[in-house]
Image: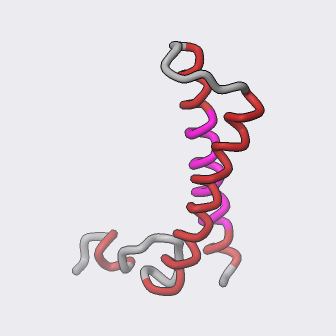
Amino acid sequence: MSSKVLADIAERTLAAYVTTFLGLLIADGANLASVSAVKAAAIAAIPAALSVIKGAIGSRFGDKDSAAWLPGRLRRGTA
C-alpha cells in the first residue's frame, strides 16, 4: 500500500474513533446510555478497527489510490 492510502486509512480510522467516542459520551450525558469514559474509549476502538479493515479492502478492490470502495472514476463522476 502506498503512503497516500495509509494516510487515507489513518484519517478514516481516527474519524471513526473520535465520532464514536464523542457519540458515546454525549449519549451518557443525555442519560441515553450509562458508559464510563474508559468504556467509551474501549468501545470506540471497535468501529475504528473495522474502519482499518474496510480501508484495506477498499485499497485492494476499490480505488487503488485510496481507501474508498468505489473506483475513483465513479467517485469523481466520470463513469
58 is within the stretch colored magenta? no
Q: By what rule are the colours in the image chosen?
A: secondary structure
Considering every residue shown, the one lying at the far right of the view is: 38
| Percent of width and height locating residue 17 | 63, 46
- Count of labels shown? 0
- Judged left or right of residue 54, residue 9 is right
9 is within the stretch colored magenta? yes
- Judged left or right of residue 32, residue 7 is right
The correct choice, above or below, for 13 with respect to 55 in the image is above
| Percent of width and height locating residue 60 | 52, 86
Considering every residue shown, the one lying at the far left of the view is: 79
| Percent of width and height locating residue 77 | 25, 71
Towards the viewer: 16 or 27: 27
Quadrant of the image containing the N terminus: bottom right
Quadrant for residue 48, please give it.
bottom right
**Which is the main secondary structure of the residues drawn in magenta?**
helix
The correct choice, above or below, for 29 with respect to 47 in the image is above
| Magenta region, residue range | 7-21
| Percent of width and height locating residue 40 | 67, 34
User: Which residue lies at the image location 64% right of the left edge and 44% below the top edge?
Assistant: 44
Quadrant for residue 21, please give it.
top right
Quadrant of the image containing the C terminus: bottom left
Considering every residue shown, the one lying at the far front of the view is: 34
Towards the viewer: 17 or 8: 17
Quadrant for residue 75, please give it.
bottom left
- Judged left or right of residue 32, residue 76 is left
User: Which residue lies at the image location 70% right of the left edge and 76% below the top edge?
Assistant: 3
The correct choice, above or below, for 46 with respect to 30 in the image is below
